[in-house]
Image (cartoon, helix red, strand yellow):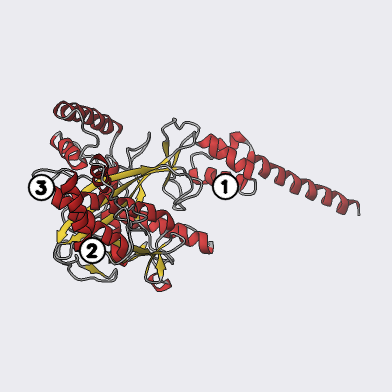
C-alpha cells in the first residue's frame, strides 16, 4: 500500500511537472523567442491567445500596426495562405474617396438621351441567383498612391474579384477564406516597385506639374494618360489611379467591359458629394465625384453582350463582367417614370434612391450642353434662357423642372432647344423678338400637358 501511495505521488508529481513544464515552455517569452525561427509556431500561439478575448485581439492588432504613419502602412501575411495577403492600417479615421459614372449617348436621329442602367447580381459570381431588386450605378473606390511599405502598384482585377467573392462566401456561410497566388494569372500579374522607384515617380510627377501649370495656370485635373505617358518617357511606370478621372475610366471599363476608345472630351465631372452614410458602407464617410461619360451622337445604340458571351465582340461594345454586374441596359430618359414619392422606375424595377439626384444632375448637364450647341454658344443653360426673359422684362416665364425624366420633362427640353436655336439664329434680340420666340416655340412644340411656360397658363 505504501508503495502504491508513493507511486501515485510520484506519478502525480510527474504529470503535474510535465504539465507545468509544457505550460511554461509554451507561454514563457524566452521559450517563445527560441521558437521564433519557426514563424508558424508564433503565429499559431498568437491566434490561440487572442481567439477568445476580443480586448486582447484588439490590443494585439494595435500593437502589430503601431508603426503605421498617419498616411497608412501596409502589413503582410507571409506565413499562411489564410485570408488577405496584406492589410493597410491607419491610426486615424479616414475618409473614403470614390467615383460614380453615368454612361450615355445621344441618338443622332431622334435627339433623345439614352442612359446605361446596371443591375448587380444578388450573389457575386452566381448569376443563377438572379439580379438585385434595383438598378444601380457604376462606381468604386480610388486605388491611389501606395502607402508606406506597399509592394503592390496595381491590384490584379482577377485577384480582387476572387478575394471579394471569398469574403462574401465567408460572410454568408462561414466557409473559411482561402486565397492562393494562383488566383493571379500571368496576364494580370501583380507588379512590384521599390521605395526608390516611388521616390523617382514622385519627383517626375512634380516636374510634370510644373510644366503643365506653366502652360495653363487655370488647369484643374490633369489627364491621367498624359501623366503616365510622361512618366513612361522618363523610364517610369505608375499603374495606380493617378486621380479620380483615372478611377472613373478604370471602373467604367471594369464594370461595363467597354472595349472602345475613351477620350478626355467624353468625360465630365458634374459635381461632388460628401454625404455620410448615403451609399456603400454606412460607417465610411465617402467623398464621391460623379462623372458623366457621354459617347456622343450615334445612329444606334452600342451593342451590349450578355455576361456569358464568350466569342469575339464588336468594337465599341459592352459586356457586364458577370462577377458583380449581371446585366446592362440602354434606356431613354423619357422611358424612366417618376412616381409621386419621387422614386424613379424603369418598368417594374426602381433605381437606387441615392442615384436619382446623380442622374438628374447629369441629364441637366447634357441638356444644357445641347442648348449651347443649338444656340451656337449664346445660351449655356435652361436658367440662362430664364435670365434673358427677366432681362427683357417678359411676362412669359419658363417652367421650372421638377425632374429630368418622363414625357413632360422631354417636352420642356424641346421648347428650351427651340428657344435657344432661335436666339442663336437672331442677329438682334429685343423684348418683342424674344417674346415672339417664346410663343412660337410653345406653339410649334404643341405641349400637350398644361405647363406654366407662359404667364397666363397654369400647371
Q: Earlier in the sequence, mark 2 or mark 3?
A: 2
* Residue 64: percent from left, percent from top: 51, 36
To which quarter of the image does residue 144 belong?
top left
Instruction: Please give the residue where the numbered disc 3 appears in the rendered image.
Output: 426
> In which quadrant of the rendered image does the N terminus lie?
bottom right
Q: Position of residue 63 (x, y in %)?
A: 54, 34
Which residue corresponds to mark 2?
A: 318
Residue 127: x and y in percent read 38, 70
Left or right, 73 with respect to 101, comes to right
Horizontal arrangement in the rendering, residue 29 relative to residue 183 (left or right): right
Q: Residues within 10 Å of mark 2 (few under 14, many from 20)?
A: many
Q: Nearer the viewer, mark 2 or mark 3?
A: 3
Quadrant in the rendering for residue 184: bottom left
Q: Which quadrant, please, contains the C terminus? A: bottom left
Residue denoted by label 1: 47
Q: Is residue 325 above or below residue 83?
A: below
Under circle 2, the secondary element is strand
Q: Residue at x 21, y 44 (%)?
A: 380
Give the mark nearer the N terminus: 2 vs 1: 1
Task: Kindly report the distance in space between the C-alpha atoms of the residues bearing marks 2 and 3.
Answer: 42 Å
Who is closer to the viewer here, 12 or 148? 148
Amino acid at each position: 500500500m505504501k508503495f502504491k501511495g508513493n507511486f501515485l505521488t510520484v506519478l502525480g508529481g510527474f504529470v503535474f511537472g510535465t504539465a507545468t513544464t509544457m505550460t511554461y515552455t509554451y507561454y514563457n517569452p524566452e521559450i517563445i523567442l527560441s521558437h521564433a525561427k519557426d514563424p508558424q509556431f508564433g503565429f499559431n500561439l498568437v491566434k490561440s491567445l487572442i481567439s477568445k478575448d476580443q480586448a486582447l485581439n484588439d490590443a494585439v492588432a494595435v500593437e502589430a500596426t503601431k508603426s503605421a504613419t498617419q498616411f497608412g502602412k501596409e502589413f503582410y501575411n507571409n506565413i499562411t495562405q489564410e485570408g488577405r495577403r496584406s492589410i493597410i492600417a491607419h491610426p486615424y479615421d479616414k475618409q473614403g474617396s470614390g467615383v460614380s459614372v453615368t454612361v450615355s449617348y445621344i441618338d443622332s436621329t431622334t435627339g433623345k438621351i439614352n442612359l446605361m442602367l446596371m443591375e448587380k447580381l444578388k450573389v457575386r459570381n452566381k448569376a443563377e441567383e438572379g439580379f438585385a431588386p434595383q438598378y444601380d450605378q457604376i462606381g468604386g473606390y480610388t486605388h491611389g498612391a501606395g502607402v508606406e511599405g506597399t509592394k503592390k502598384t496595381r491590384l490584379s482585377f482577377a485577384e480582387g474579384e476572387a478575394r471579394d467573392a471569398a469574403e462574401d462566401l465567408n460572410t454568408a456561410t462561414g466557409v473559411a477564406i482561402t486565397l492562393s497566388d494562383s488566383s493571379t494569372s500571368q496576364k494580370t500579374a501583380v507588379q512590384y516597385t521599390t521605395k526608390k522607384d516611388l521616390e523617382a515617380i514622385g519627383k517626375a510627377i512634380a516636374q510634370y506639374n510644373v510644366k503643365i501649370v506653366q502652360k495653363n495656370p487655370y488647369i484643374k485635373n490633369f489627364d491621367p494618360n498624359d501623366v503616365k505617358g510622361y512618366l513612361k518617357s522618363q523610364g517610369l511606370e505608375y499603374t495606380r489611379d493617378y486621380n479620380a478621372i483615372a478611377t472613373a475610366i478604370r471602373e467604367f471599363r471594369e464594370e461595363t467591359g467597354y472595349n472602345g476608345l475613351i477620350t478626355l472630351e467624353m468625360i465630365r465631372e458634374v459635381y461632388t458629394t460628401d454625404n455620410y452614410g448615403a451609399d456603400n458602407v454606412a460607417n465610411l464617410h465617402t467623398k464621391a465625384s460623379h462623372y458623366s461619360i457621354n459617347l456622343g451622337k450615334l445612329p444606334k445604340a452600342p451593342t451590349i453582350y450578355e455576361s456569358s458571351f464568350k466569342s469575339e465582340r464588336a468594337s465599341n461594345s459592352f459586356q457586364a463582367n458577370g462577377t458583380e454586374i449581371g446585366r446592362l441596359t440602354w434606356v431613354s430618359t423619357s422611358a424612366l417614370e417618376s412616381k409621386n414619392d419621387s422614386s424613379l422606375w424603369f418598368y417594374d424595377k426602381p433605381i437606387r434612391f441615392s442615384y436619382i439626384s446623380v442622374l438628374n444632375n447629369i441629364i441637366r448637364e447634357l441638356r444644357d450642353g445641347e442648348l449651347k450647341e443649338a444656340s451656337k454658344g449664346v445660351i449655356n443653360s435652361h436658367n440662362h434662357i430664364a435670365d434673358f426673359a427677366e432681362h427683357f422684362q417678359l411676362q412669359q416665364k419658363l417652367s421650372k423642372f421638377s425632374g429630368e425624366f418622363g414625357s413632360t420633362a422631354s417636352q420642356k427640353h424641346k421648347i428650351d432647344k427651340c428657344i435657344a436655336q432661335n436666339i442663336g439664329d437672331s442677329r438682334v434680340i429685343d423684348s418683342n423678338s424674344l417674346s415672339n420666340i417664346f410663343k412660337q416655340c410653345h406653339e410649334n412644340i404643341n405641349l400637350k400637358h398644361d405647363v406654366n411656360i407662359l404667364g397666363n397658363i397654369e400647371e
